[in-house]
Image: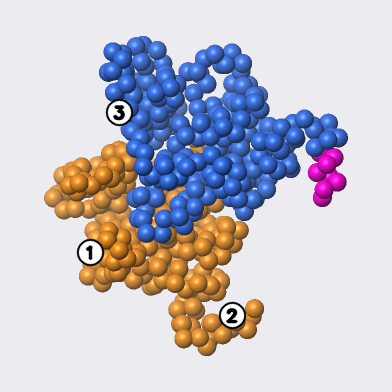
Chain colours: A orange, B blue
Amino acid sequence: MPAMRLYRLYISRERNYVRALNNMLGFVPGNLTLYKLAFRHKSVAPQLKEGLKNSNERLEFLGDAVLGAVVGEMLFKKYPFRDEGFLTEMRSKIVNRNHLNQLAKKIGIGDLMDYDTRMINNPIKQGSLMGDAFEALIGAVYLDKGYAFTKSFILKRILKAHVDVDALEQTETNFKSKLIEWCQRHGKEVLFELMPNEEGSKSKLFTVKVFVDGDECGTGQDFTKKNAEKTAAERACTFLNI
Amino acid sequence: MPAMRLYRLYISRERNYVRALNNMLGFVPGNLTLYKLAFRHKSVAPQLKEGLKNSNERLEFLGDAVLGAVVGEMLFKKYPFRDEGFLTEMRSKIVNRNHLNQLAKKIGIGDLMDYDTRMINNPIKQGSLMGDAFEALIGAVYLDKGYAFTKSFILKRILKAHVDVDALEQTETNFKSKLIEWCQRHGKEVLFELMPNEEGSKSKLFTVKVFVDGDECGTGQDFTKKNAEKTAAERACTFLNI
């Protein structure tokens, strides 16, 4: 419906937002509520009910899964003679938090993000805000347009335009050792601290914080301490621009 | 094409296989090669090239991702007021190896599996053969029929028929402690052993084996030692019928 498209882009009350999204995504979005939610960080999200904020975190869960499937299939087809261990490693190079943060910045998610502006000069608090929103955006596109559309969006608009898969194949990333080496080189002390869960919490997630010379530089949460450390180290690397 | 459907079910050379799959899946499969590959364990797979067997392991990688996305979306929609931590835990209860092994048995994957028959009476070697093939089957359905079809297949034919999501919500599973408790109760010694990687291997995967009174009961592989242990413990629980 080109008339509807033109109306939404140039006449509707939301035309500026629709145009901004159209520029970023390459298509006119349907349900704007989804996209607004995808860009809403929990720091500014209203409470939906006890213990649940209306932030982008649920969409991030969905988008993460859809992104994993699309990237998984792309790798499956691109590398017909590589085993599943290789495919798993390659995928994690593409969808790791650090790389997603970079992608999010490349496509300009920052301009549309809705978050507590006191975080602007506080990279610690910002953390992986961008990468998280990127995944949430994928979740929004999926709910708005379905799987086939989202797949084509990810492959053409994101991977083809911004990711050099062949170059990634050659890279090696172990964020924990990267961080530790950097700290040794710069005479800084690095500390991984396992945080206690809130009293009464039944969550099985581990929370690990990384401190560099006493300053908190990254937090990771996962079902295993090792993975929580890995995420925390990755975020600290982003934070410190290592 | 009902004529083609009838031909494939009752006349074609492969009619028995097509009928068996039709009974299991509820639809007439297209590309049989994919399904045969999904049911082919590495113990009988021909070498495709140096280091790669033509087994179901790559399809398992793909199916795992597709299953994660479909189950993720189902949970996202079923629980609109639960946070992403809850959704993640619920998903892992559905797609954990133990549960997938059970599902695979329920739908009768064993009858179509192609594996070294010397494994029949050796549950150690069998391990998660069934659950792995179940994921590979999802990968095959996806390549054969596309995402929408696969989603509907998983939701209607698998989850609705065989999984009580509400009951799973109440269960608690920590396979490592489950295994350790069981061994203590039965006066058995349990040992988690980290296996060295093959010399020259660049893989970053950890391999952990569980031994109960000296007998190997399960193996796990993952990027973290903790996760490898978890998988190994889960498989040992399956093996020992705990």
* Magenta segment boundaries in residue numbering: B1-8
- The residue shown at (38%, 73%) is A111
Residue B203 on the magenta span: no
Mark 1 crowdedness (10 Å alpha carbons): few <14, some 14-19, many ≥20: few
Does residue A30 appear in the picture of this structure?
yes
Judging depth in this view, the residue of A169 and A217 nearest the camera is A217
Q: Which residue is mark 3?
A: B177
Q: Which residue is mark 2?
A: A5
As measured in the structure, the alpha-carbon distance from the residue carrying label 2 to the one carrying label 3 is: 57 Å
The quadrant holding residue B192 is top left
Type of amino acid under label 2:
Arg
- The residue shown at (17%, 47%) is A199
Does residue A171 appear in the picture of this structure?
no
The quadrant holding residue B37 is top right
Type of amino acid under label 1:
Asn
Label 2: chain letter? A
Farthest residue in the left direction?
A: A214
Residue B2 on the magenta span: yes
Q: Which residue is mark 1?
A: A122
Label 1: chain letter? A
As measured in the structure, the alpha-carbon distance from the residue carrying label 1 to the one carrying label 3 is: 40 Å
Q: Secondary structure at mark 2?
A: helix
Left-right relation of A49 to A147? left
